[in-house]
Image: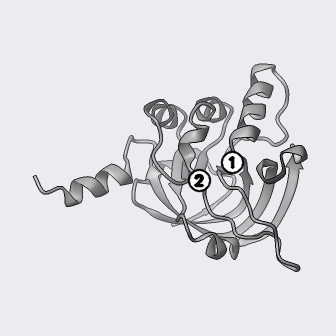
Amino acid sequence: MKLTTPLTDSAIEQLHAGDKVSITGVIYVGRDAAHKRLVAALKAGEALPFDPQGQIIYYMGPAPAKPGDPIGSAGPTTSYRMDPYAPQMLEAGLKGMIGKGNRSLPVREAMQKHKAVYLGAIGGAGALIAKSIKQATVIAYDDLGAEALRRLEVEDFPAIVVNDMYGGDAYEDGLKQYNRE
């Protein structure tokens, strides 16, 4: 399924665990340190460096770009490290998160409450994923280096719906499919 950002509730409602998606538009990049600052800003009533309404955030630390490329290898990082911050970001309007690995129950419940999804990107495929990134710009927290908040323009960014807004979980479904009980 093709997705264009920003995401709408109707687009989220069509997604189910296990669906393959291709994302075109703008996505944001942030990891632990950036999320800590974003949530601190939310708690303080301050404006965020980007409007999270309908947006997707990618948990990734980019490698340096080669000359002429917008970004270096751009593989996903482990998502559970952002779990303490994800419910607040979803409440602020975020509609999608991209990373690798499982999410905690509070994050999954927040996705259901706020009509959001968690998408998996393939770990180890950072060079391939980077080909879908057409532009990368640091928009905040430059002092964090690789963990700075970035705005990416992507075209046909590949991902799989891991957790949908209905409580579905592609990882759990996969385990059940091959369970030998």
- Looking at numbered disc 1 in the image, what kind of residue is underneath it? Gln
Q: Is residue 80 left or right of residue 176?
A: right
Report the residue at 85% width, 25% height from top.
46
- Looking at numbered disc 2 in the image, what kind of residue is underneath it? Ile
Tell me the tag on residue 117: none
Q: Relative to residue 34, is residue 147 depicted above or below?
A: below
Inspect this view and state whether residue 137 appears.
yes
Q: Which residue is mark 1?
A: 55
Nearest the eye: 30 or 18: 30
Nearest the eye: 179 or 110: 179
Question: For the residues marked 2 and 1, what is the alpha-carbon distance in whole angstroms?
Answer: 11 Å
Q: Which residue is mark 2?
A: 98
Q: Which residue sits furthest bottom?
A: 68
Q: Is residue 165 left or right of residue 54?
A: left
Q: Is residue 39 left or right of residue 170?
A: right
Q: Is residue 46 left or right of residue 93?
A: right
Residue 57 lies, in percent from the top left, at: 67, 49
Report the residue at 57% width, 53% height from top.
99
Q: Which residue sits furthest top?
A: 44
